Amino acid sequence: MQPFNGLVSFGIGKAGWNPIGKSFLVDLIFDTDFVKGSSQNSAFHFNSIDIQMTKNLFGERKDKTSLESTKWAYIDCHGHSNYDIIQVICRHLDIALIHINHKDYLNIKNKGQLYKDIHLLTQTVKHVYLLIRDYTESEVRIILDTSGDKYQTSIFIPNLTSKNTKIHSVTKSLKNIGYEILHLKLDPSKNIGSEFLEKVMSDLKYQYLNEIQKDKQLIQGITNYIDKVARSSNLIDFSFLNFYPIFVEYMSSYHQASYETDQKIIDQLNEKRGELEEKLKNTKMCDVVMQFNEILKRKNSTLIMWKLSQELSLLSKKIINCMNLTLDKVIEQKNDKYTLEILWRESLLSNKYGSLSEKDRENYAHTFAASFSNHVERGEAFELIDGDNLRFFNQDIDSSLYNLYERQNAELTKINKGKSIKMKQAPIVVSIFGPQSSGKSTLLNYCFGCKFLTSAGRCTRGIYGSLSRLSKPVNNSSHFLILDTEGLDAIERGNIQDTSLIHFDR
């Protein structure tokens, strides 16, 4: 394969928060199409790295004395990518574009921590361009450092969302910069050829094999324990959890009391509920949830949970197939499959009722809230109403998502004549309802890019939500909140004699 000249684009500091992102700017400079070719923001796109190979659209090199390739490969790093990966990529390339918020530029000029980070990442790179983002002026300004510092080119780029920015002039200046970059004389040994990926993976192999092994151990620790408990009881139940089985009893008593007319029975059910609540307060966190919490702490927690969800589904099918069950029992067991939602519920209950010290509770709540916020912010589906117990997790979710709403508000703050204007925090809510197995989840996935689980014979239970980011604000909102509901006239509900669940559709 004929080698490609290569360059890498990445951000440090606060550059990743810019609403007109790094990919957009690379497209503007080099006529690539990273933005158009990228999928919606998701766990699989988060902190990922894209590469696009193309012919130099600005023409052949004027210097025809060399056989230098005019093919280029652009590497675009999304989000705040891992510095270890960027350092390895830079080791094999000669051009780096580093996006920096203009407020962070002073840190670099004063040789602060960001300066040290850049030096560490690009110590083998010959041409380093600092793209100073959201500069206060209306046109591009270029500063060449003649002090001998390797970061000789600083390109100040105005805020592209500002009405005062002269977009045509800025675009023309950026195109000229792209032309100059693509006509630099580069080290012929530093290119993206057939051995590039092999070299990068070789440098990262041992470090990332260890990380992958840790992820695998966390998943296996949970599934192996559940498998062991299920085989000993010959049932798919939730005896491996500490809080959830008690909570199921608690909610059952609550619903029975709500629909009961005999005051004596109501008093008995309320007394039972009080005893169960005390039992919840004195319960300790189980081993499975401790392992689940370790997953929440991992940087790639959403991807690990996606894999865990697949493994739990396979485990449910395997255990059902191994059991000698009647047809009625098979139907009942399929309604109680192991799912990720069960672990989320147990974690929420552990946070609310667990017998933890004040400091441990605060630390646990912070970790859980941060992980849950990231999970929701990336567009992953989350449970709003527990369809098995008709529990609405409003207070728990509200407190967990507080930090998310704060971040949204910070992103949506716009400057108008020197005054900060806060846009509405509430998302636009879209819901759907209809008969069971009519394709509601599939329709929402196609319309809004959600990730609600769908498969033959699988039916949503309760209500799930998914936060979908808009490309531009609509009615001062930056997100859709999509609600996916359980189907009406569900066959499973008809088999349940609990009067509270019979009235579920109402």
Image (cartoon, rainbow, N blue to C red):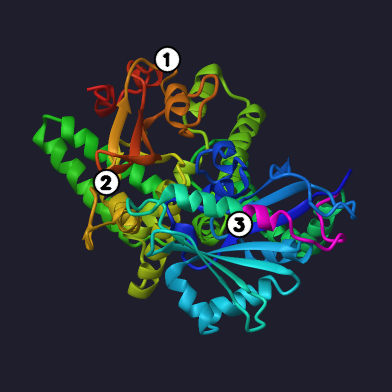
The residue that mark 1 highlights is 438
Q: In the displayed structure, does residue 30 sit left or right of residue 404? A: right
Disc 1 is placed on an element classified as loop
**Marks 1 and 2, Cα distance to the nearest angstrom?**
27 Å
Q: Quadrant of the N terminus?
A: top right
Nearer to me, 478 or 35: 35
Residue 238 belongs to magenta span: no
Q: Is residue 482 visible?
A: yes
Residue type, mark 1 in image: Ser
Rendered position, 125 above or below 24: below
Q: Earlier in the sequence, mark 1 or mark 2?
A: 2
The magenta segment: 178-193
Disc on res. 394: 2
Height in image: 90 above or below 35? Answer: below
User: Split into 4 quadrants, where in the image is the C terminus?
Assistant: top left
Residue density around tag 3, few if under 14, some if 14–19, many if 20 or more, within 10 Å? some
Residue 226 shows in the view: no
Task: Please tell me which residue is depicted at 63% across the width and 74% down the height of the picture.
Answer: 151
Which of the two residues, 239 or 267, is positioned nearer the viewer here? Answer: 239
Q: Is residue 2 left or right of residue 119?
A: right
Residue at label 3? 177
Mark 3 belongs to which amino acid?
Ile
Please name the amino acid that badge 2 sits on: Asn
Magenta-drawn stretch contains 188: yes
Per the rendering, the mark at residue 138 is: none
- x 66%, y 30%: residue: 322
